[in-house]
Amino acid sequence: MTQNELLPPSSPAPDISLIIVSFNTREVLRESLQSVEREKGPLRIETFVVDNNSKDGSVAMVESEFPHVRLLCSPVNLGFGAANNLALALATGRYVVLLNSDAFLCPDSLRLSVERMDAQPQVGLAGGRLVGRDFSLQPSARMFPSILSDFLVLTGLAGKFPNSRFFGHFDRTWADPMQPAEVDWVPGAYSIIRADALRKVGFFDPNFFLYSEEVDLCRRIQQAGYKIMYWPDIVVIHIGGESSRQIKTLEMSSTGAQLIRWRMRSTLLYYRKHHGSGAWMAKMLELALYQLSALRNSQSHDPARRERANHNRNLARLMHQAWQDTQGGRVSPPRPWKFD
């Protein structure tokens, strides 16, 4: 049976195909789906959950508590983009909404999203204002990465001068977060995408297992002639911003080190795809900063600074590994990327 046969011939297309990718997030996934139920109102919505081989009972919970949800189960962890692609291939809505399993819709978020997209056909993808449970603002609207912006972020200058248009360019920290704006990309925790735009540019690039996949998609949508918008009156609670803080200790756990290595892999893949030799420049920038910091701090008698030197030597080692893993950003390692 095809997807079209699942709907009566006279049924109008859904307004939204809403997709949630989940990997061992049963409790927050339940809360996320409950927020969708609260907020769908009169909108016609088909909801997909793509489970990335969870082991925590997520599948059974969705089957028993949300039987109307279309559940797609992968036998392996596909990562973010490729898992979304499974549902995108079946989606029939005029718009696609991507929602993290640890993100919850606030009142009127879906209604406003559809109204904005209907009123502005030149917009291919848009995001809203991401906040924590305490409604503290999270980065919600960004500009494309560049070697300069990487330098400003990695050296801490972006954080030191957040009100500067130059130093705060990447995260737009200088901008009023309550003002709508055309931007380069929005985080994947929540976005609404015009189905016609996806038909033009394709789905997520599966070479990105985790990190950079939404940046790449936004760049391709923008290159197809559409705008990327940030609309602050669309509010979404995202607890990932609260739980995924930067590692506070200078000793990296094995999991933390792997996630950093994955981020580096995706950075190299992104730069190679869109900037060619920029991948080598991105590698050399990070290596230079890590090695300089390690050299400076290793001369100190302060144990904390000597520990910081070890931390930066580890970061340099991870970048070398990421460069080898991806053959300089040219090849994505086989999925699923593993903790090794």
Image (cartoon, grey):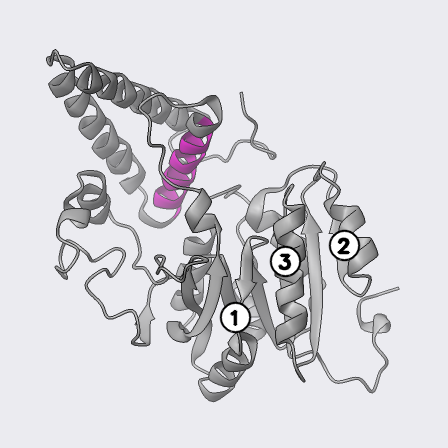
| Residue 329 image-quadrant placement | top left
- The label nearer to you, 1 versus 2, is 1
Q: Are marks 1 and 3 in contact (CB under 8 Å)?
A: no
**Left/right of residue 171 with respect to residue 108 in the rendered view:** left
Which label was assigned to residue 106? 1
Foreground pick, 330 / 15 = 15
Estimate the spatial distance between the alpha carbons at disc 3 and disc 2, rounded to whole Å.
Answer: 11 Å
Q: Which residue is mark 2?
A: 62
Residue 306 lies, in percent from the top left, at: 20, 15
Report which residue position mark 3 lands on. 31
Secondary structure under the numbered disc 2 in the rendered image:
helix
Q: Which residues are magenta?
A: 258-273
Give the image location of residue 203, x and y in percent.
57, 58
Q: Residues within 10 Å of mark 2 (few under 14, many from 20)?
A: many
* Mark 1–mark 2 distance (CA, rounded to whole Å): 21 Å
Lower sequence index among marks 1 and 2 = 2
- Counting residues from the N terminus, which is met first, the one under dot 3 or under dot 2? 3
Residue 85 seen in the current view: no
